[in-house]
């Protein structure tokens, strides 16, 4: 069995390579398309995590309406599942933090790590929205390999009052995107059928004054300061 340092190094090295090959897009706002984000064993383990899709979820275009049902890679979950801990190790790696700053301009090391595991079923949708200002960085990673989900990727909209659809990111296993939340970063998931289980990770670096500390992946800030 691999030791933790070996696993962490392997995962961080793969993600650094992923960033080297990221495809930058600048319309309607800067974002980066990613492939081969996580090691194969981790993306497969993510898909197999023993979590049932949320029961009784409300589909009104806002994830916040189901806050009590959401799953975060907090320290308690990391103790239960090595997969969750290994992913947290990647996104707290100092080399990863520095490369993210170099690629995106976001000083993610000044923030705190928050990772959400999503399982969306038919009926789910998200209205066009911008992430709240205390989110410093957003990355989405698609997890399932179900070919029926080819059109289940994130939608990107323009900054007009109508928020016209500009593009939809293809939903493919171990692919995703990065963007830095800002005034024009409208995104969501337009109403359409979901054929299967839309599994994804949402990775945020958030401001140090993030209030919902139970959602955070580590109890310390990434720069080592006590919160």
Image (spheres, rainbow, N blue to C red):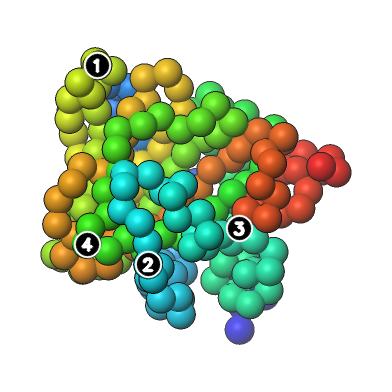
Specify which label sits upstream in the sequence, 3 or 2: 2
Q: Is residue 11 visible?
A: no
Q: Is residue 61 left or right of residue 89?
A: left
Specify which label sits upstream in the sequence, 3 or 1: 3
Specify which label sits upstream in the sequence, 4 or 2: 2
Question: Rounded to the nearest whole Å, what is the CA distance between mark 3 and mark 4?
Answer: 29 Å
Question: Rounded to the nearest whole Å, what is the CA distance between mark 4 and mark 2?
Answer: 13 Å
Residue on which disc 2 sits = 56
Specify which label sits upstream in the sequence, 1 or 4: 4
Give the residue drawn at x 70%, y 49%: 213
**Local crowd size for mark 4, using a 10 Å CA cut-off: few (<14), some (14–19), many (≥20):** some
Residue on which disc 4 sits = 122
Does 159 sit above or below residue 113?
above
Return the mark for residue 161: 1
Q: Position of residue 209 (x, y in %)?
A: 72, 34
Q: Position of residue 214 (x, y in %)?
A: 68, 55
Does 167 sit above or below residue 58?
above
Q: Is residue 158 visible?
A: yes
**Local crowd size for mark 3, using a 10 Å CA cut-off: few (<14), some (14–19), many (≥20):** many
Specify which label sits upstream in the sequence, 2 or 1: 2
Residue on which disc 3 sits = 88
Q: Quadrant of residue 147?
A: bottom left
Question: Rounded to the nearest whole Å, what is the CA distance between mark 1 and mark 4?
Answer: 27 Å
Between 9 and 222, the one nearer to me in the picture: 222
Helix, strand or loop status at disc 2 = loop
Between 146 and 13, the one nearer to me in the picture: 146
Does 208 sit above or below residue 125?
above
**Local crowd size for mark 1, using a 10 Å CA cut-off: few (<14), some (14–19), many (≥20):** few
Helix, strand or loop status at disc 1 = loop
Between 212 and 3, the one nearer to me in the picture: 212
Of badges 3 and 1, nearer the viewer stands 1
């Amino acid at each position: 069995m691999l030791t933790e340092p070996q696993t962490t190094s392997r995962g961080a090295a793969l993600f650094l390579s992923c960033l080297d090959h990221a495809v930058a897009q600048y319309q309607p706002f800067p974002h980066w398309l990613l492939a081969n984000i996580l090691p194969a064993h981790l993306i497969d383990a993510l898909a197999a995590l023993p979590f049932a899709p949320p029961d009784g979820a409300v589909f009104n275009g806002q994830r916040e309406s189901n806050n009590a049902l959401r799953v975060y890679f907090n320290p308690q979950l990391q103790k239960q599942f090595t997969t969750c801990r290994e992913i947290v190790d990647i996104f707290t790696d100092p080399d990863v933090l520095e490369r993210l700053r170099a690629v995106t301009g976001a000083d993610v090391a000044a923030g705190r790590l928050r990772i959400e595991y999503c399982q969306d079923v038919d009926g789910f949708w998200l209205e066009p929205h911008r992430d709240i200002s205390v989110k410093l960085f957003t990355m989405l990673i698609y997890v399932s390999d179900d070919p029926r989900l080819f059109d289940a990727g994130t939608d990107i909209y323009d900054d007009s009052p109508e928020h016209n659809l500009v593009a939809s990111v293809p939903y493919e296993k171990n692919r995703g995107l990065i963007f830095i939340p800002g005034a024009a970063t409208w995104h969501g998931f337009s109403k359409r059928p979901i054929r299967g289980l839309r599994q994804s990770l949402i990775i945020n670096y958030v401001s140090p004054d993030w209030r919902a500390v139970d959602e955070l992946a580590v109890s310390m800030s990434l720069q080592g300061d006590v919160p």
